[in-house]
Amino acid sequence: MLRGDYETNAGLGSELDALPIPGFIVDSGGELLSYNHYFQEICNEKKQEPKSLVNILTLATVQFLDLGKKVFRFQFHDFESEGETRRSYVLWPIHDDPKIAREIRTGSRQRMQQMEDILAAVPDLIYVVNEEGIYLDCRAFDEKDLPRPLDQIVGSSFWDMPESDELKKKIWQLILVALRTGRTQTIEYERKNRFGHLHFYEARISKSSQDTAVYIVRNITERIVAQKELASSELKWKSIVENGYDSIILLNRDGRIRYASSHSASFFGKTPGELMEMQAIRLLPQYSTRLIRLYYKLLEGKEKRATLHVSIPDPNGHLIHLESAWISRLDDSEINAIIINFRDITKQVEFEKNLKSNQETIQTILRTTSAGIVILEGTKIIFTNNQFAQLLEYKSHQLLGKDISTLAHSNDRLDVVQRAARRKQGDTSQLHYKIRALTQNGETKWLDCHSGSIQYKGKNAVIVTVNDITEQQNFEQKLIEAKEGAEELAKLKSSFLANMSHEIRTPLNGVLGLAELISMSEDLDEIKEYVDLQKDSGMRLLNTLTSILDLSRLEAENATLELIPVDMNKLVSDTYKIFKLPFAKKELELICELPINQLVCMGDETMLQQVMTNLVGNALKFTEEGSCTLRLFEEHSKKGQDCIIEIEDSGVGISEEFLPYVFDTFRQELNGSSRKYEGSGLGLAITQKYLTLLKGSISVKSAKNTGSCFTLRIPLKENSQPKKKKSA
């Protein structure tokens, strides 16, 4: 076939009457399918049924025919139509009239141009390929769908196209089938265009001549994407319908159920399959008359939407209330049904019944409660009970319509207005606050208020419950004033004791110094005994005064200390050396465990030594047998590295009941003259306050008659070394 023949053949079947020469079409079996009036004139026959001219194909086997005393030449073409190969014939006169010949040539050119214009407007790719796989022609409405530029395709090989081998094999097999059988082949596939974008295509492959095939490729990406989106949308909405709490039912025009969602079974006691094709009236037989009227209104288009409230027994025999919404979509060709949505409103109906029955009870509560109740719309009072009115010395009717902010103390009015503004903006939270209100006589009263949002007579409102706390508020104010006075007295006490430090310590140290000299005389045995007692008493007094003064100093100096680096190894070691002999005199063992590396903390060395003296002195005082162990090591905490000091003894221990108070000022487990151990009870309190200033802490673990372990935790100075223990 010549190039372009495949373009003209397809039009012969529908344009025979436009040909200025005889023409007709037969199928593969030789049966005449169509012909024009020129052919009818030649045959000198009236137009008859195709089967009366089945022998036309026999005439096509000769080169010349003599019909009606005129000689014609045959020319025929094969073309594809409705999946079948058909043949068209054109009869050409041998002795042509020049005028007729011109008309024939002109008509042919016009038809060729028309076909060219039609092909140019077709939004497809058109390829012509021979049986060797060489592209003879290519036409493209949009070149972006081509796998390579258009000018590189004609004359190239089918196998050189930049498509996957698998796809090329599939298409080539279809080309061979079309050439062998003459039947049109179709395929859908996806591939990237020459710009790298993935698209979906549909190809139709037909035989064009004995050794050529034409296949037309259409971009169906939009259709595929739309189909996928539609399928996804259908799946989504079906999932919503099937998983919802409502029952969805579709009715045909004849009133039969076409679809029922799975939740319908919980309402009507039948599965969706059992509901199919059932008349809708059978679902609610007790409402048959109303259903029929409603159905015909929707069917006739008098109404598009309607609602119907019904009450029916559920599968368990309990009465349920349903709200049904009826929507006509009969004018929608895709739906063509009446949609019914059944929703269970049983709880809502019961709630409304209970609400109605409780209204009288609520009104009684509002009248008899001891609390004042006021309902506000913005800042306007729209309801008040007698208690609220009496609280502010008004009559109830005097407060209705009044602005609540005018009843508030001038210092609290802005808060009232701001709360109302937040409510207006949608704040529905429960609020609790105190406010000062003015009575009708100008007296100030403190009110404790709880407020929340409610619906009152169909409007958004705020209900406030009010209690008079004027007396309580006055009492609390007096307590605050008393507390502030006590705190002031405590500060004065601390300042006084701090000022007395020099006046008390200096003469007392002189007395103790003289007592030390007298005690060294060997000739005055009796005097020495008295002096020893004087010395012990003086030391006890000194320790007590020292503790009091240390405590007052920590308070009077506003907790400020001058901190310097302190060698904790030396501190613990010195404490061990000081107390080694006193422990030995009581036949107790004193053990010291120090790390190999030096640990350094920031602190007041004198005060730290006093802390160690207090703790180790307590261990000596309260231990009758066994031992006491001093441990120093470092430990990691959330804030960094800490220095840990443990003082563990095997003494009398502390009872579980007294442990929470062990660090309180002036507190001892046993009080009075009958107690066995003397002391001021200030040592541990001072230790705790001092460690707090150092951002450290002290804790204790103890049990009665098993001993105690006090643990000091002090932040290490940076660059301290890891812990390693040794015994001393």
Image (cartoon, helix red, strand yellow):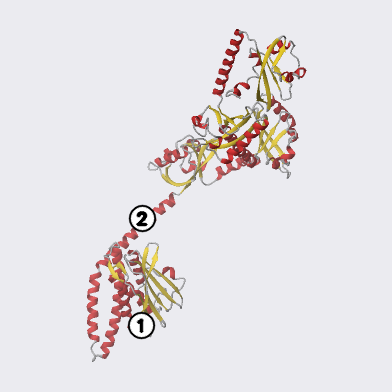
**Residue 679, x across and y down, in percent:** 35, 75
Read off the residue under disc 2: 481
**Residue 220, x across and y down, in percent:** 57, 32
**Residue 238, x across and y down, in percent:** 63, 38
Which callout, 1 or 2, points at the residue further toward the start of the chain? 2
Read off the residue under disc 1: 583
574 horizontally vs 12: left or right: left
Residue depth check, mark 1 versus mark 2: number of the one nearer the observer: 1
Residue located 24% across and 91% down the image: 522
Q: CA distance from mark 1 to mark 2?
A: 51 Å
Position of the N terminus, as image quadrant, is top right
**Residue 713, x across and y down, in percent:** 37, 68
Q: Amino acid at mark 2?
A: Glu
Q: Residue furthest right?
A: 52
Q: Residue furthest bottom?
A: 523
Position of the C terminus, as image quadrant, is bottom left
Please say if the residues under marks 1 and 2 sit with CB atoms less than 8 Å apart.
Answer: no
Q: In the rendered view, would you say 120 is above or below 602?
A: above
Q: In the rendered view, would you say 338 is above or below 613?
A: above
Residue 494 can be seen, yes or no: yes
273 horizontally vs 495: left or right: right
Query: Which quadrant holds residue 345?
Result: top right
Residue 325 can be seen, yes or no: no
607 or 634, nearer to the observer: 634
Residue located 25% across and 72% down the image: 504
Q: Secondary structure at mark 1?
A: helix
Query: Which quadrant holds residue 629?
Result: bottom left
Residue located 74% across and 20% down the image: 58
Query: Which quadrant holds residue 625?
Result: bottom left
Q: Secondary structure at mark 2?
A: helix
597 or 564, nearer to the observer: 597
